[in-house]
Image (cartoon, helix red, strand yellow):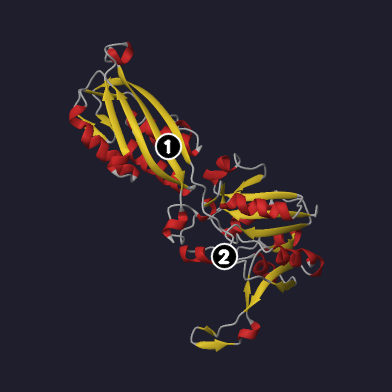
C-alpha cells in the first residue's frame, strides 16, 4: 500500500475525559496509547508514510518514542487534519482518531479494498435504537453511526477542507463538496474513547506496567541584596534574595528539573527560558504547578520527592515544616511523601562563604494507573 499515507490524530486536549492524563497518553504496558495504536496499524499494514498529529508542546517529546512524521495540530480536528495533509504526497490518505484505539483489521481491510469505489470510503454501523430529532422520531433505517478510519482521495479531501465550514469527519466534508462516498460495514470494536466511562468498553486496553522512574535536579543561585527570598514557595525573612530571571526559588527550580528528568521532558530552561521576558520575575510556585500538570498529562503519577538545601545562611530550621507543606500542596503529594533537608556547607566553597545556595532534588514517578479510577 505504497499509495496510502496513514494519518493519526492525537492532538486533542481530552477535555471531556475527566482524568489527569490525556487519553492519548494512557500507558499500555510500557507504551502510551498513541504509540500502541500506531504500532497496531503499522504491524498489520504497510503504509507509504505514517503521520502523527500532536499538540505543539508534545511534538519533541513524541519524537523520542517513534520514528514517524509528527505534525503540530490546530485548534480543531479539521485544522489538525489540514496541517497533516500538507505532508501527504500519496494519492490516498487513511485517517484515524487515536481515540478509536481498538483496531478491527478486517474492518480496515474492507475500507482499503473499496478505495477505488468512491472519493471517501467510510465504515459505518446501523442504528438499532429509536431515533428522535428534536421531538420527532426519524427513520432509523436511513441513519448510520459513522466511524474511522476513513480512506479518502487526497486531492479531493484537500479541496473539501478548504471551505470555511467546520466538519466533524472527512466524509462530511467530501459530501459537502458534492463528491461520492461509499459505506462499508463498520465494527462494534471500533468504539471511540471519549469519556472515562468508555474505558471498560475498550477490550484491547491493558494496564500500565508497574515501573518507577527517578529524576535528579540541581540548581544554584547567588544572593542579591534587597530582593525577597523565596524557598519552596515560602517567603524567608532575609535581607537578600536570589539573583535570577524569575523569583529565584532555587528549591523549586531543582524540583522542577527532577520531575522533568523522571518523565524525560527536558529541563526547566527549555520550558521556561530565561531569555523570555514572559518569565521575568515569574512565580516559581506557578511554574511548578504547570510542570506537575504537564507530567500528569503525559501519563505519569507522582510518588514522592526528596529535597536537600545547602545554605550557610539564612537559618532554615524554623521554615522546614512550612516548606514541606508548601511543596506537598504544589505537587498534590501527601506530606509524608515529601522529604526536605537543610544543611550547611561547613563554611566551605561559595555556599560556605555565604554567597548563595545550592539545592539537590530527587523525584520519583510511576505510570498513571488509570484502571484504578474506573
Evaluate whether residue 78 shows in this view.
yes
Q: Secondary structure at mark 1?
A: helix
| Residue at (61, 49) in percent of width and height | 35
Q: Secondary structure at mark 2?
A: loop
- On residue 205, the disc is none
189 w.r.t. 48: above or below: below
Residue drawn at the location 25% of the way across and 26% of the way down: 227
The residue that appears at 30% across and 25% down in the rendered structure is 309
Q: Quadrant of the C terminus?
A: bottom left
Q: Is residue 304 left or right of residue 263?
A: left
Q: Is residue 156 left or right of residue 270?
A: right
Q: Observer-nearest residue: 318 or 131?
A: 318
Q: Which residue is mark 1?
A: 259
Residue 234 rendering spot, x and y as whole percentages: 24, 35
Q: Position of residue 341 (x, y in %)?
A: 28, 28
Which of the 4 quarters of the picture holds residue 365?
top left
Cα distance, mark 2 to mark 1?
32 Å
For the N terminus, the image quarter is bottom right
Q: Does 162 appear above or below 221?
A: below
Residue 354 image point, x, y percent: 26, 15
Q: Nearer the viewer, residue 25 or 334?
A: 334
- Dot 2 or dot 1: first in sequence order is 2
Q: Residues within 10 Å of mark 1 (few under 14, many from 20)?
A: many
- List the residue tagged with mark 2: 192
Q: Nearer the viewer, residue 148 or 152?
A: 148
**From where the camera sits, is residue 280 visible?**
no
Residue drawn at (49%, 47%), measured in percent from left and top? 298
Amino acid at each position: 500500500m505504497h499509495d496510502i499515507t496513514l494519518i493519526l490524530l492525537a492532538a486533542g486536549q481530552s477535555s471531556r475525559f475527566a482524568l489527569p492524563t490525556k487519553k492519548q497518553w494512557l500507558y499500555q504496558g510500557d507504551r502510551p496509547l498513541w504509540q500502541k495504536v500506531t504500532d497496531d496499524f503499522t504491524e498489520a499494514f504497510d503504509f507509504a508514510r505514517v503521520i502523527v498529529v500532536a499538540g505543539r508542546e508534545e511534538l519533541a517529546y513524541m519524537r523520542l518514542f517513534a520514528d514517524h512524521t509528527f505534525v503540530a495540530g490546530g485548534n480543531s480536528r479539521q485544522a489538525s487534519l489540514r496541517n497533516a495533509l500538507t505532508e501527504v504526497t500519496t494519492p490516498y490518505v487513511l485517517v484515524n482518531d487515536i481515540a478509536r484505539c481498538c483496531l478491527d483489521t478486517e474492518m480496515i481491510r474492507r475500507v482499503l479494498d473499496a478505495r477505488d469505489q468512491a472519493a471517501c470510503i467510510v465504515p459505518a454501523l446501523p442504528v438499532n435504537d429509536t431515533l428522535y430529532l428534536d421531538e420527532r422520531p426519524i427513520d432509523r433505517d436511513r441513519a448510520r453511526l459513522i466511524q474511522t478510519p476513513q480512506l479518502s482521495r487526497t486531492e479531493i479531501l484537500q479541496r473539501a477542507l478548504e471551505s470555511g465550514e467546520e466538519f466533524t469527519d472527512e466524509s462530511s466534508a467530501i459530501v459537502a463538496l458534492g463528491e461520492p462516498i461509499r459505506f462499508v460495514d463498520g465494527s462494534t470494536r471500533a468504539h471511540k474513547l471519549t469519556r472515562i466511562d468508555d474505558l471498560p468498553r475498550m477490550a484491547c486496553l491493558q494496564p500500565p506496567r508497574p515501573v518507577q522512574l527517578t529524576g535528579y535536579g540541581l540548581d544554584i543561585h547567588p544572593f542579591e541584596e534587597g530582593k525577597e527570598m523565596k524557598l519552596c514557595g515560602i517567603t524567608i525573612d532575609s535581607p537578600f534574595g536570589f539573583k535570577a530571571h524569575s523569583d529565584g526559588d532555587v528549591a523549586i527550580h531543582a524540583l522542577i528539573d527532577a520531575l522533568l528528568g523522571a518523565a524525560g521532558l527536558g529541563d526547566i530552561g527549555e520550558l521556561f527560558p530565561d531569555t523570555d521576558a514572559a518569565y521575568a520575575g515569574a512565580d516559581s510556585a506557578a511554574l511548578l504547578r504547570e510542570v506537575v500538570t504537564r507530567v500528569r498529562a503525559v501519563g505519569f503519577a507522582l510518588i514522592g520527592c526528596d529535597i536537600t538545601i545547602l545554605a550557610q545562611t539564612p537559618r532554615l530550621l524554623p521554615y522546614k515544616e512550612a516548606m514541606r507543606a508548601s511543596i506537598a500542596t504544589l505537587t498534590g503529594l501527601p506530606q509524608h511523601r515529601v522529604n526536605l533537608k537543610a544543611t550547611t556547607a561547613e563554611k566551605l566553597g561559595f555556599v560556605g562563604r555565604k554567597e548563595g545556595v545550592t539545592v539537590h532534588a530527587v523525584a520519583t514517578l510511576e505510570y498513571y494507573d488509570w484502571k484504578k479510577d474506573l
